[in-house]
Amino acid sequence: MATSAEAAVAGEEQLLQLLDENGQRTEHARLAAYVEDVDAEALRGMYRDMALTRRFDVEATALQRQGQLALWVPCRGQEAAQIGSGLATRAGDYIFPTYREHGVAWTRQVDFAEMLRIFRGVSNGGWDPRENNFHMYTMVLAAQTLHATGYAMGINQDQRGWDAERRAADGDAVVAYFGDGASSEGDVHESMVFAASFDAPIVFFCQNNQWAISVPFEVQSKVPLASRAAGYGFEGLRVDGNDVLACLAATRYALDKARSGRGPVLIEAVTYRMSAHTTADDPTKYRLSTEEESWAPKDPLTRLETYLRQSGQADDAFFEQVAADADEMAAGVRAKAFTFPDPVLADSFNNVYAEAHPLIREESEWFRQYEAGFADNQTGGAR
Ligand SMILES: Cc1ncc(C[n+]2csc(CCOP(=O)(O)OP(=O)(O)O)c2C)c(N)n1
């Protein structure tokens, strides 16, 4: 019989699933309890959230191609992992995203258009993280996992003296999102050691989309990422990341466990990045179209649509309405993006430190003089 390590190497660890790729419900004794309340309306809502996220992604990609955004980071294919996990959170929970979590942002009521500010280059952020407990995007891989663990340890301080029952009912938790590539960063390791040592209320949610730009998953890890959790002394779950119901159930379970003081959980959502890494990337240079095609039948939207139709929980009229709403949303996002004012350069200097700093003041003055040098040219004056 294979040892657990050998089984992990062979990728035999169980993939948790509630909705298979043919759109059929599957039984799962452990997860089922976490989606008992999900009725037809909730399922339609999840479909709608995924469809709007995909439509937003298409619109943002088009805006980048038209020169209106400096860059776009598509999330096509990862909608179930994002909507399922995002919907599992409570308002008081705090989310630390990477840079691709547009669907999670949507579940936290962050306005889609506001999310374009950073990619249009008019802001270093785009939204106020305190309004929705949804942190700024983090471009430095895995840095946010340290912030997230620190925040979760802070929650422990705030909730000191609370018993497990009160924590479960009223306690807060943290979700840290990162990718399979980021899992190779030392920051993730340090975050997990601290989180385990202090039973920090945190769920590490890794979207394993198989590629870290051009580096395949096999180079990041010899074992499924979920199995790494055991090395830190906490639980790891390997979930079908294209199954929105399984992602919802697994994240609800993990958040319950973490917030009630029973330690962190690592979720590895096995999914696929169907688009390019960013609009600056060309995946045809490093992966085969046959691989991309092999993931198409697992599409998270298609499988939920199949299930909703076959079980009579949604009809043509519903899907037509969602498509129309999505087009209307996309037009609104586009129109709003054009209204963003140009950034004030002085702010870039003023926002580096909370208080005045002599070096920044010096650099700011140098830049002011540098810019003033162009004024003569513009007015045609002599230099
Ligand atoms: C510390 C650091 N190293 C390298 C990079 C360059 N970089 C940007 S995205 C990326 C790949 C990330 O892959 P993964 O974590 O799997 O996330 P994905 O983009 O696939 O969602 C790399 C290497 C970076 N942003 N930060």
Image: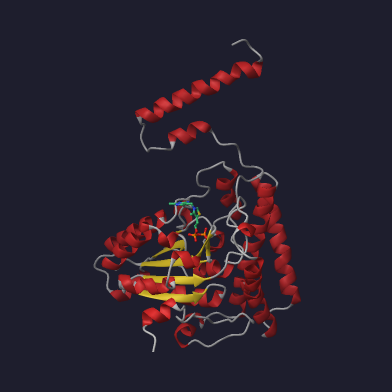
In this rendering, the count of numbered labels is: 0
Note whether residue 124 is visible: yes
Nearest the eye: 129 or 64: 64
* Quadrant of the rendering where the C terminus is positioned: top right
Corner quadrant of residue 322: bottom right
Residue in view at x 74 percent, y 64 percent: 324
> What scheme was used to colour the molecule?
secondary structure
Corner quadrant of residue 344: top right
Horizontally, residue 114 falls left or right of residue 180, namely: right
Residue in view at x 69 percent, y 84 percent: 310
Horizontally, residue 88 falls left or right of residue 228, namely: right
Residue in view at x 58 percent, y 75 percent: 42
Residue 98 pos. (x, y %): 48, 57
The furthest residue to the left: 161
**Against 163, is 52 above or below?**
above
Residue 249 pos. (x, y %): 48, 77
The furthest residue to the top: 382
Corner quadrant of residue 172: bottom left
Horizontally, residue 379 falls left or right of residue 34, namely: right
Nearest the eye: 123 or 294: 294
**Against 200, is 361 above or below?**
above
Note whether residue 198 is visible: no
Residue 112 pos. (x, y %): 60, 55
* Quadrant of the rendering where the N terminus is positioned: bottom left
Residue 275 pos. (x, y %): 62, 61
